[in-house]
Image: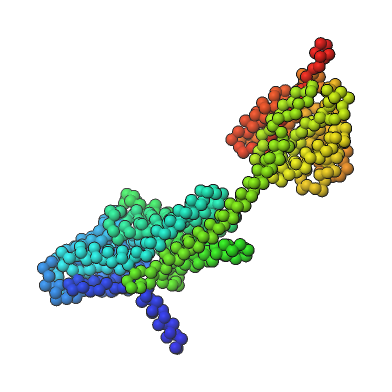
Amino acid sequence: MRIRTLIGLALAALSLAAAPPAPAQEPGVLRLPWDQWQMHLGDDPQCAQIIAPTCIGKPMVFEDWGPLNHWQRIEVALPADLQSTPQLGLLVQGDYPVYEVYVNGQMIGGSGSLATRQGPQCARAIFNIPPGLARQGRLVIAIHSLGIQTANHIDGFVPTIAPLDRLQTVGDLDTLNYLRSSWLHYLCFAAMFGTGVVFLLLFSVNTRLHEYFWLGARLCILFIFRVFELAAVVDMSAPAWLAIANYSFWNSVGALFSVEFVFSFLGRPVTKFFRLIQICCGLQIFILVVLLPWPASWFLPVAHYSENIYLHHLAIGAVLLSALSFLLLVPVCFKSKLPEMRWIGAAALFFAVEESNRMARFIHLPSLPQDFFWHGVDIDLRGISNLLFAIVMLIAMTFRLRRIQNRNREVEQEMAAARSVQQILVPDQLPSIPGLRIESAYLPAQEVGGDFFQILPIPESADPAKPSAFIVLGDVSGKGLKAAMTVSMIVGSLRAFAETHRSPGELLAGLNRRLHGRVDGFATCLVLMIEPSGKVTLANAGHPNPYFNGVEIHTEANLPLGLAPEIRYSEITLQLPPDQLCTLVTDGVVEAASFTTRELFGFDRTLAISTQSASSIAEAARAFGLGAPQADDITVLTIARTPNLAEAIA
């Protein structure tokens, strides 16, 4: 029993601390707190009468979500000083933009229109109380409201009876007192907005880190909520539907951003379950659409459906689950060895618990209070906790961004080194070989490609003035830095083997032995040995066939390099007449794909243009796939013999 008593006292203390301080009853001012009012759900005009036995209900609380119409009713005994006041007024300041006010069964005014269901966001209004009613000393005040809230609930504003000429001052003082007590609340969210902007700037530095964008946008959205909340306190001439639109849209989009942030951070696609959660959050947007100021002739039936309690709870429940999605980050972050990841995990856990507690309140699940008043200042735990979350995430993810940038800088340095190597492996200026006219075109798909070619004079030729030459064209499987390193190994081996091997088949066999077991992939390669007489000996290791004078030369199908040891590569011999063209291409030419039809450039088109220059062939293949990312490197070599004097005379 003692434990139960202590628990009860603790909960009572929390409730008292969480509740806003009740406005003091100033002389000549009668406050009417909402917890003293009775509520009746429905549209019964008898609730406005002095005697209304059917309207005895429960005290009005904010969590009530009734049908379109409901009544709030209170019986008031006026103090003597107010009974003698010549002209009394009633200041109504509540959560509903559309309402009618009755005193002793007589309507004295209202806000908005029940017919069109439209009203102002700041629904505060002052009404004259007929003098004859006030002198009776007993008033029955009834407020007939539509069940559409402004979506921004403000505690502390209650109906007030006072002399008519004082009510404007009373309302202004209530507004000023609210702003004085809530400065910390708005300061926290303004700081969160600044933090969100920093995240967006960090995203602009590295646009591949989408989690920075989603988190920055999520934090900025929370501040937009608070700006529109002020429209319910300070009259900005904003209609209520705009506030509801703001609340519904940004609450839905904010939940979507939360889920996108979590899965972007994890580097995974959003699962089907959380896609369903995002769709359910879209019910908030549905509520927004049906609450816009459409024609009342068909609007009311849809509005009835939109305010169904189950639809509302489903949308809020989806937002609750989106907040819980942050729990997916916790185990991943705490398993990481990086110190900032543990901070991110703690911040994600803190955010998930706080947001879940807030959303649980809206669907009547057990939750802890989030507001405490200390020396007249509203200590809003939501604002403070969200600000702490934003600051911790900013610090941790700044360290993370710095680490990623350092890693990117290292990769860029490696890529720069690889580009320097490739400039040697794929030379811009071709060596001059007497008797041969060679042209090249090289269009890499990435900064570092996997194609390579070499023109290697063969020493100790019969005629030193007209040496023979090896011409090698190849393609390494894969792309990027790894492929470039394989190319460097191949080219280094080529230059060494060219001094000791005297035939293309031997050269390919030596390269195959060197690559086997040393690389993960493979390489295709075509080697030609051209002698001064025009004799051409060639061997092929899985590479596209060459073209002589517009005719494809069919070679024996051999395995690419690096797949199996001790492969023998067969050779064929041809004669290249003077001024005739030999064309070599990589598969990037043949496999260039059209962006619209997905059709390949193909062998037929390659054959048709094989007598053109190297640059023309390469550009034709690239233009064929224009609009789509280049899938493979494109390399073309053309070789032509220049006739010697005897051949020219002949």
Task: Describe residue 347's horizontal placement relative to residue 126 as left or right.
Answer: right
Q: Residue 280: x, y in percent?
A: 48, 57
Camera sees residue 83: yes
Task: Describe residue 55's horizontal placement relative to residue 533 as left or right.
Answer: left
Residue at 70% across, 23% down: 612
Which image quarter: residue 34? bottom left
* Residue at the far bottom in the pictured view: 1
Colour scheme in use? rainbow
Q: Nearer the viewer, residue 308 or 607?
A: 607
Which quarter of the image is occupied by the N terminus?
bottom left
Residue at 82% across, 46% down: 516
Number of numbered discs: 0
Q: Residue 472: x, y in percent?
A: 78, 33
Which quarter of the image is occupied by the C terminus?
top right
Q: Nearer the viewer, residue 53 or 383?
A: 383
Up-down relation of residue 151 to residue 585 (above or below) = below
* Residue at the far top in the pictured view: 649
Task: Describe residue 232's horizontal placement relative to residue 599 as left or right.
Answer: left
Q: Nearer the viewer, residue 158 or 45?
A: 158
Camera sees residue 557: no
Q: Nearer the viewer, residue 22 or 360?
A: 22
Q: Residue 76: x, y in percent?
A: 21, 74
Residue at 61% across, 35% down: 595
